[in-house]
Image: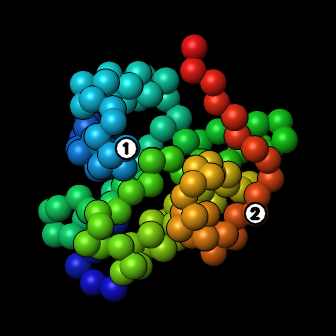
Amino acid sequence: MNADFKIELIPHNQMESILPLVGLLNKGTIAYAILQKRLKAILNMGGYECIGVYDSEELIGVCGLWVLNKLYSGKHVEPDNVFIKKEYRSRGVGQLMMDFLFQYAKEIGCEGSEVNCYVTNEKGQKFWERQGYKPLAYHYFMNF
């Protein structure tokens, strides 16, 4: 892995920098203005952070994370909108983000982590299983 990669939590006042990568993650199906509006609402809710991985000054990977408490799992982190630029994949960036995420979660007193992964994302499922996640339930969603 490139020793020049830098990883850190992105300050809230710089959070909009993640939107170009989130746009790529969603294959351009969500307008940038909608992503901006949603991000603003998310930040106003609280409990959301984002890990950024940089090659020099270029943001090459993001991993949003929610700090949550649920009755069945206690305090935990949930990675969200995990994306690495195509040219940086298979270079250890995902593992770097997960190592950072899990260390951060332990530091803030989390008991574990849960993640959602699209049923069509076989590579993602394999990645999460390599990280130690195990399928627990189905995640359903309904648009109104």
Picture disc at residue 42: none
Residue placed at 84% from the left, 41% from the top?
72
- In the rendering, which numbered label is found on residue 134? 2
The answer, for residue 49, to whether it is visible in the render is yes
**Residue 26 has which mark?**
1
Residue 47: percent from left, percent from top: 53, 35
88 or 57, nearer to the observer? 88
Give the amino acid at mark 1.
Answer: Asn
Most extreme residue toward the left is 57
Q: Is residue 22 left or right of residue 58?
A: right
Q: 9 or 33: which is nearer to us?
A: 33
Percent of width and height locating residue 60:
26, 62
Q: Under tag 1, what secondary structure?
A: loop
In the drawing, does residue 90 fall left or right of residue 143? left
Which quadrant holds the N terminus? bottom left
Q: Earlier in the sequence, mark 1 or mark 2?
A: 1
Furthest toward the front, the residue is 120
Q: Residue at x 33, y 36 (%)?
A: 29
Q: CA distance from mark 1 to mark 2?
A: 25 Å
Please report the residue visible at 75 percent of the width from the left and 44 percent of the height from the top: 138
Q: Is residue 21 above or below residue 91?
A: above
Residue type of the residue flagged with mark 2: Lys
Would you say 102 lies left or right of 74 here? Answer: left
Placement of 102 over or under 49, stated as above or below: below
Whether residue 109 is visible, yes or no, is no
